[in-house]
Amino acid sequence: MDSQYKIIHPVKYLHDHLAQDVRPDGRQFLSFRPISVNVSSITQADSSAVFKIGNTTVICGIKAELAAPKAETPNCGYIVPNVELSALCSPKFRPGPPSEEAQVISKFIESILINSAAVDLKNLCICEDKLVWVLYCDLLCINYDGAVIDACTGALATALKALTLPRVVHDPDSGNTSVQYENRVPFPVKTLPVSITFAIFDRQLLIADPTDDEESLSLGKLTIVLDEEVICCIHKPGGIPVSQELFIRTLAKSKRRADLVRSLIHTAISSTKKKFDSLDKNIMHVDK
């Protein structure tokens, strides 16, 4: 009966719960869903991560390729993020070209990388004006249940933090390039940007980490991206205005949430590194 009521009267179903100071999934208004992080799941990629917030799940795979630098930045490589919201992740999407939402999120993810200064693109340069690394970052959503920007940002930050690149020796005179795939070096990442999304309802009611149903029925959304202690991006795609008091509340909650997310990312990467180090030692022991 409860599920039928939700399908027939989705707005009233949500508002009935909010009137009782509880959300349909049992959370308080400013409570977040659990997060899980998995690193190096895709062996074909140079780095990968699976980031899950509640049911929302995003997989990030990074593929590094050598290319000529852009004319305007001869001493910098470049990063190309691409978000895909496939028909598999939600009934609201259809097969075919990227949806408008996917394109908007891809552009926003790119702006996060630029504004957060999480990476120095000069570290991707091998030989100025000749050869640089290009990082193709594919972000595939396999389950869409709200706060997808947060999941994409988390997956990309994790994959970048875990990324290693082969050593490359380039002779600018002869043009010969030698790639040492077995000799890899970690890619330096300065900080881990974390995004936190809120939904806004009547009378400035604030909902943290909204589900897809809550997002679609809200009167506005607000995403705050934090780079350590600094706000590097704010995304508010229309909707009702946010009061100063409400913004301060979102900022306080965002800082605590961002610290937790960074801690989980560091723990996941550290655990994976220890696992592979142990595996390498066992292989060496068997070889001997």
Image (spheres, rainbow, N blue to C red):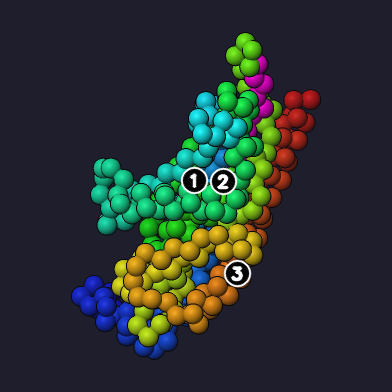
Total number of numbered discs in the rendering: 3
Q: Which mark is residue 173?
A: none
Asked if the residue under mark 2 is in contact with the one under mark 1, i.e. CB atoms within 8 Å, the reply is yes
- Distance from disc 1 to disc 2, alpha carbons, whole Å, reads 7 Å
Front in this rendered view, residue 283 or 174: 174
Residue 97 lies, with reference to residue 263, above or below; the image says above
Which residue corresponds to mark 1?
Answer: 60
Front in this rendered view, residue 217 or 251: 251
131 left or right, relative to 276: left
Residue 134 lies, with reference to residue 111, above or below; the image says above
Asked if the residue under mark 3 is in contact with the one under mark 1, i.e. CB atoms within 8 Å, the reply is no
Front in this rendered view, residue 93 or 171: 171
Residue 57 lies, with reference to residue 41, above or below; the image says below
Q: Amino acid at mark 1?
A: Cys
Q: Amino acid at mark 3?
A: Lys
Q: Please give the name of the residue rendered at 64% of the width and 47% of the height, measured from the top-left corner.
A: 189
Q: Residues within 10 Å of mark 3 (few under 14, many from 20)?
A: many
Q: Please give the name of the residue rendered at 62% of the width and 27% of the height, measured from the top-left corner.
A: 128
The answer to whether residue 223 of the structure is visible from this angle is: yes
Q: Please give the name of the residue rendered at 49% of the width and 80% of the height, measured from the top-left corner.
A: 244
Rendered image quadrant of residue 229: bottom right
214 left or right, relative to 206: left
Q: Return the disc, 1 or 3, that comes first in the chain's sequence.
A: 1
SS under mark 1? strand
- Image quarter where the C terminus lies is top right
Q: How far across and down, in percent of the image, does residue 95 sit?
A: 26, 45
Which label sits in the foreground, 2 or 3? 3
Q: Return the disc, 2 or 3, that comes first in the chain's sequence.
A: 2
Which residue corresponds to mark 2?
Answer: 159
Rendered image quadrant of residue 282: top right
- The chief SS type of the magenta part is strand
Q: Which residues are magenta?
A: 163-171
